[in-house]
Image (cartoon, rainbow, N blue to C red):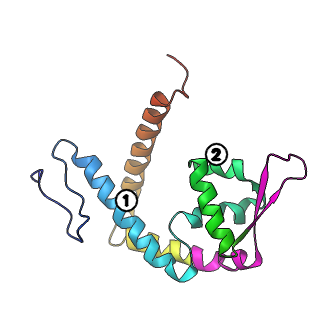
Amino acid sequence: MPPASASVPGEDDTVPAVADAPMSGALFRAARVHRITAGNLLRETGLHPGQELLMMRLWEQGEQRQADLVKTLGLDPSTVTKMLQRLEQSGFVSRSPSPDDRRAVLVNTTRAGRALRDRVLRAWRDLEAVTAAGFTDEEYRQAMRVLTRIEENLSDTHADTDGSSPAG
């Protein structure tokens, strides 16, 4: 096990390893590098990491309420609002009041937003290839099982601590 003072090589914002939480530290570092790589691959699209997930949802489901995007993406409403403002300023989405509910805002892709789809999907295929480079089929399946288990563990913990799970 590395000493507590070990850090990830890189810039001034290195992430220190935590001796008492090696898995969490490794997961944090991997997620950080994954996000940086995603950002590099998405750069030519004009999107920032995270924005493509919102766009993918719109491409798959079509126009939807902003509140539904918040729920589906599992993000804070202010984060989604900021994301949508930036996407709207870039000309990739449009927002309009719902004709059925004055409190609701409908979000849809624009022609420019729809034109990004193939490039974004290609960036994600490239990200997958880089992420899984050198894995055997069995290692890939094992990694997917481990990551799914981690996600389930964290989701269970989140539900237990945010008051959304029923009392047991």
Locate residue 137: give its quadrant: bottom left
Residue in the image at 66% along x and 72% along y: 89
Amino acid carrying label 1: it is Ala
Magenta part of the protein: which range?
A: 94-120
Answer whether residue 119 is magenta in the image: yes
Answer whether residue 76 is magenta in the image: no
Q: Earlier in the sequence, mark 1 or mark 2?
A: 1
Q: Which residue is labeled 2 in the image?
A: 71
| Extreme residue toward the top, this view | 168
Locate residue 139: give its quadrant: bottom left
Residue in the image at 71% along x and 66% along y: 59
Is residue 136 visible to us here? no
Q: Position of residue 123 (x, y in %)?
A: 52, 76
Q: Secondary structure at mark 2?
A: helix
Locate residue 166: give its quadrant: top right
Amino acid carrying label 2: it is Lys
Q: Is residue 54 left or right of residue 95?
A: left
Q: What label sits on residue 142 in the rendered view?
A: none
Is residue 138 visible to us here? yes
| Extreme residue toward the left, this view | 3
Q: Which residue is labeled 1 in the image?
A: 31
Q: Position of residue 60 (x, y in %)?
A: 71, 62
| Extreme residue toward the right, this view | 99
Residue in the image at 76% along x and 55% along y: 64
